Image (cartoon, rainbow, N blue to C red):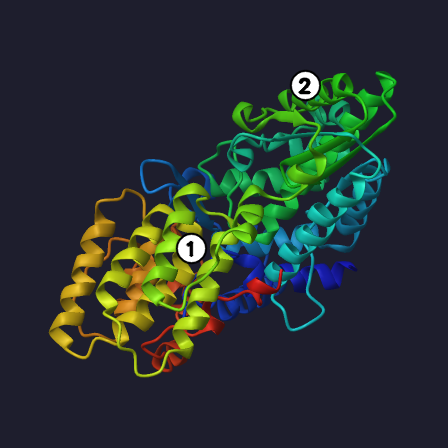
Amino acid sequence: MSWREARKFFLKAESYCNVDLPPYFDFKKILSETNRYLEANKLSNVLASKPCDHDDVNHTIVTNKDGKFAWRPFKLIHPALYVSMVREITSKDAWKLIRNRFELFSANPKIKSISIPVESLTRKKDKAEQILQWWQEIEQQSLELSLQYEYLAQTDLTDCYGCIYTHAIAWALHRQDEMKKKKNRNAKKFIGNVIDRHFQDMNYGQTNGIPQGSVLSDFISEIILGYADSILSEKLKNLSITEYMILRYRDDYRVFTNNPEQSLEILKAISETMYSLGMKLHPSKTGATNEVVRNSLKADKIEWIIRKQSDENLQKHLVLIHNFSTEHPNSGSLLRALDNFYVELQKTRNPKYNPIPLIALITDIAIHNPKTYAISSAILSNLIFTIKDKSTRVFILNNINNRFKRVPNTGHLQLWLQRISYFHGNKLIFSEPLCCLVKDAKTKIWNSDWISDLHFKKILSPANIINKRKLRQLNPKISSQEFRLFELFSL
């Protein structure tokens, strides 16, 4: 992309937030108006104080990972800081430097990154295009590489985004030895320092961790991981290891060799490289095998292919999926299975089944599989719609909500539960601030106390992310357009 194309891409609502949210959360207006304001005004000229001196500058959406106590924070970056960073990295000179660095990072054809963000050239969403690229480039290419290599080693990083050292962004873009010189450490002429400063402003001055939940953060992480690729390449050259192929999707590595000892040497080199950048390998997800073909395909996909995948009886079908979800939680095959069930549910005319047992099954699936929140909510909305008695619908919704309340860190889930319950006249209370914003335009989402310009503050009002037209046009039943990236079952 040219710098202009890149700016347009990063300022898309889909790039700003790549977390699945109900469709009435719309960031297009706030991003375009913030960009228009910053075209005419420097952010530094409208500061009442430093952003890094304020807490809660970004908004955190918490999602549970396993139905227990593991959780992941997604961030809605403060629009002023997000747009400011986009404009900085997509200035003509900065973008040229960044592109040149990526050429350097990818100089070794034996280490291939599959995770640089892509823009869809079709009607698919960008996120769908990225997933499709993963399937084509990682899974399919892994199968092809099984013809050349006998061993496959795999690993990924522990809490990659949370461990990224923001100073390392400047190291990656301008060379580590140069940026450690005292005169260069905070110099604004270096785009790496500018990016670093923006992340510190979002995070109360901290230098560890970047916010997860936007394509911009995915791109910045690629700068760090691409830099790591170049360091790793040099290490392997010094070790005289030449017969290998590494495929990397973000922090997920697949290492192909014909020598098991070299597989371990490469994993060691990856570990040392990451340690120098403040990151480390995930020990339970690190290992090697000589079953290259079998391990090129995800275990959940193989299991779902060989199992009985459906049943004409909807309850039996969902029991099959529930059982599969306990063995392969949060898997891509589980999403495809639920999507297929949703399609079958849509085909059912004059339903004679009892929806409440189905509601119980899908609720339990959602609780333990956060990646399914959107599709599970769509199924729940369709099942609840079949209950004719209003008081029964409200009773069921209250039971679902009470079940979810027992699980910690479910802000993301609350957003979809609110979407389900919106039409049924209940008075469920949600603690997630974005849920409160749907009912009350004055709800505070991100902290703008550091901005002095009242007009700019009005532009940045969280009320501007609620699309009231889309809210009015909602159907009680969640449609496939609200949650489906693409035809999942076609993969």
SS for dot 2: helix
Q: CA distance from mark 1 to mark 2?
A: 35 Å
In the image shown, does 388 or 438 lie closer to the viewer?
Answer: 388
1 and 2 marks in contact (CB < 8 Å): no
Q: Quadrant of residue 491?
A: bottom right
Q: Which mark is residue 272?
A: 2
In the image shown, does 22 or 392 lie closer to the viewer?
Answer: 392
Residue drawn at (48%, 56%) of the image? 308
Residue pointed to by mark 1: 372
List x then y, in percent, for residue 445: 36, 55
Mark nearest the camera among 1 and 2 is: 1
Along the horizontal axis of the image, is 469 left or right of 153? left
Along the horizontal axis of the image, is 8 left or right of 74? right
Between discs 1 and 2, the one toward the N terminus: 2
Which image quarter is the N terminus in? bottom right
List x then y, in percent, for residue 328: 46, 43
Q: Quadrant of residue 380?
A: bottom left
List x then y, in percent, for residue 22: 41, 66
* Amino acid type, callout 2: Glu
Along the horizontal axis of the image, is 488 left or right of 465? right
